[in-house]
Image (spheres, grey):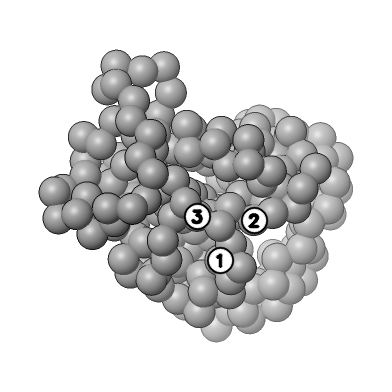
Amino acid sequence: MSQSTFTILLGGELGLTERLRHAIAGSRFIAADGGMRHAVALGVTPELWVGDFDSTPDDLDSAFPHVPKQPYPAAKAATDGEIAVSEAIARGAGRLILAGALGGERSDHALQHLLSAVSLAEEGFDVLLTSGKEEAVPLLAGTIELDLPKGSLFSVPGFSELKGLSIENARYPLKDFHLPFGSSRTISNVAEGKVRFSLTSGRAIVLARPYDLSGV
């Protein structure tokens, strides 16, 4: 599988931060409907613009006249974001950055982005969701590390029962922990620096706030 990085511009909140700049460096871009507005703030030109364009203002359309548009009817079986991700995968994406996937006015879309990210991770894709100030990565069976500033907040909500959960280098570490589905035990932890997460079985997401140092 190609390891090309594609950033999907989605309709949620997106703030330009140094971590976001670093994450998208060298990336290719695809915009989903109104997510194209982030291209202006990021100073990038996507190679494709997909969607039903029901949330695209006229001035945004005129700002990118040469970007190929791939229109879809409003009555379709997938979100604009899912279509954009599929187009990125068809172009050889190995890493997917879902920018604007968190926050915003549509909590249903934000939740769907989190669920889709876990599904994509199960298929072998490297996935990051970001609003610039908040980040999320899927946690499946295995081990991942997140380089977080000391004192920053993170949570690990489970999308299923979690077995063998370990969290190292955090204020509230866990070792080989069994987390029942729906438990709040892993909400609001504090990083001591690079945090290591291990899981034997289950599906979860790590939600981090690297610019929120209220845990210091």
- 113 and 200: which is toward the camera: 113
Q: How many marks?
A: 3
Residue 179 seen anywhere in this rendered image of the structure: no
Which residue ends up furthest to the left in the rendered image? 58
Amino acid found under the numbered disc labelled 2: Thr
Q: Sequence order check: which comes first, mark 3 or mark 2?
A: 2
Q: CA distance from mark 3 to mark 1?
A: 9 Å
Classify residue 43 by image quadrant: bottom left
Residue 176 shows in the view: yes
Q: Position of residue 39 (x, y in %)?
A: 36, 61
Q: For the residues marked 3 and 2, what is the alpha-carbon distance in whole angstroms? A: 9 Å
The image shows residue 148, relative to residue 59, as above or below, that is: below
Answer with left or right where residue 160 lies relative to residue 83: right
Residue at the disc numbered 3: 29
Residue visible at 73% across and 73% down in the picture: 194
Within-10-Å neighbours for mark 1: few <14, some 14–19, many 20+: some
Q: Residue at x 21, y 41 (%)?
A: 55
Question: Which residue does the numbered mark 1 point to in the structure image?
Answer: 24
Compared with residue 169, is residue 18 higher up or lower down, i.e. above or below? below
Taking the image as shown, residue 95 lies to the left or right of residue 163, namely left
Q: Quadrant of the C terminus?
A: bottom right
